[in-house]
Image (spheres, rainbow, N blue to C red):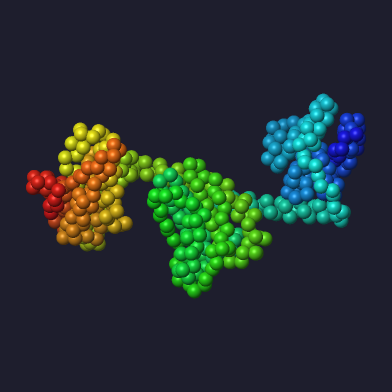
Amino acid sequence: MSPYRVLVVDDSDTARTLLARTLERAGFVVITACNGAEGAAVALRERPSVVVTDLDMPVMDGQQLLRLLKSEAATASTPVVILTSHGEAPSRFWGSQTGADAYLTKDCDPGDLVATVARLASLVPELEPRKASPPLSQLDVLTKVARQLDTRLLHATLVNRLLESGLHANDLEAASRVTSEVVRDVADVHLMAVGVTEHDSAVLHVLVTHPVSLQACRRFNDAVLAAMRLPPGVALDVRVTGTPDGDTDVDPAHLVSFPLPLRDATGVLALLPSEPQQFEVTSRDLVQELVPHIALVLDNARLGQRLQELSARDGLTRLLNHRTIHERLASELERAGRYGHPLTVIICDLDYFKRVNDTHGHMAGDTVLRFVAGAMTRTLRDCDAIGRYGGEEFMAVLPEIGLEAGLLVAERLRRAVAEHSVTLPSGKQVTITASFGVASRAELIAGATADTLVGLADSRLYEAKEAGRNCVRP
């Protein structure tokens, strides 16, 4: 006699009797139920090795029974076989999506049914002795189903809202903001963060949802960064939404983090609950349910951001490309003219750059270009724009800066390039210098274009070259 007990659920007396006989002849102990609600009550009470169920039944159908059994801890690992007259693809698909372990039609060979039940039963670990539990009525079961459906509706609503807004986010910051807004609706938290680490950079977006102290925010940031486990040398960008201007202190020991399954990156969603114990009861499962969908939104935003950068940035230096820096200059020039504000442009050309390529090779030349791009970017303000204007030419656009201040900026750029050596792929070190031409909007006649300003700065660049290079000319 097989030690396995099989629950057969079918509203047809004939079908139920035939199935029970087939399985009993194969040595199984069979218990039966005439609809999904009764089947759920029996399964939760008796904990069978396998459940075989029809789909179309009164009171509660097979799909509802399946979802209920898979959601209850006592029966979540119990294999369920759908045995029905419906062989259509939609029925098979929905059965697999709701957790069915096998799908057979009623006209299948009885041997196939027996083999399937035996295989599934053998995969289930030996059950612990059942503890006595109060019997469930059909009303109890239907209440469980209604509660489960309500929970699934809540999950579906949250996922739909996240995807509807999040998939329109065209950069990581916007996607992180959408994520935070959705999570905040189902979790009471003081602070929240989304962290993403790629191979050479990392970004941490922090949302302050309640008035907390600046020190509390800093401790939270440190705790999240520890959870991110940043590799050495990775450039980190931290952005905070909201102002930590309160006096509430919080304990970072209550930090809750969820790993985000991102493509080619690592991610973390971190929360600091207002009431840690209440969060565990009411919100953790909801947030956990959102995690794969949050990862999808973030990955989509990363891809969109990468595509935007590819169209706007130089592939080697990651600076704005020729088209984009020129468009930025035209935009800033129009704005400066409208409000009567100063604007300065700087054109830079590396001195004797051809010698680097000829002597050390083009990979060395690429290294020098990346070094210069990084050195100048670090020297400029966040509101300034810098782009690769040509092969070894760079252009910087400085809003709200006149000619005199622009000359000082150009001199700082010159020193940033000239006063540091560059380590080439071969290990050798070289120094590089650059010449600079500077021009400001105030020098132009009314209605002059961006091309006119660039032409003026370019002519001064050539004056710097003729003056011996490695210098700045207004």
**Residue at image point 16% right, 60% down:** 404
On the question of residue 465 being in view, the answer is yes
Q: Position of residue 233 (x, y in %)?
A: 39, 49
Where 205 falls versus 69 (above or below)? below
Where 32 falls versus 386 (above or below)? above
Q: Quadrant of the N terminus?
A: top right
Q: Position of residue 267 (x, y in %)?
A: 51, 49
**Residue at image point 9% right, 46% down:** 468
Q: Position of residue 447 (x, y in %)?
A: 18, 53
Q: Nearer the viewer, residue 49 or 91?
A: 49
Q: Quadrant of residue 304?
A: top left
On the question of residue 164 being in view, the answer is no
**Residue at image point 58% right, 58% down:** 256
- Tag count: 0
Q: Quadrant of the C terminus?
A: bottom left
Q: Position of residue 190 (x, y in %)?
A: 54, 65
Q: Nearer the viewer, residue 358 or 282?
A: 358
Q: Is residue 148 left or right of residue 7?
A: left
Going by the picture, which residue comes out furthest to the front? Answer: 427
Going by the picture, which residue comes out furthest to the left? Answer: 467
**Residue at image point 87% right, 54% down:** 132
Q: Is residue 391 left or right of residue 253?
A: left
Q: Is residue 374 left or right of residue 452?
A: right
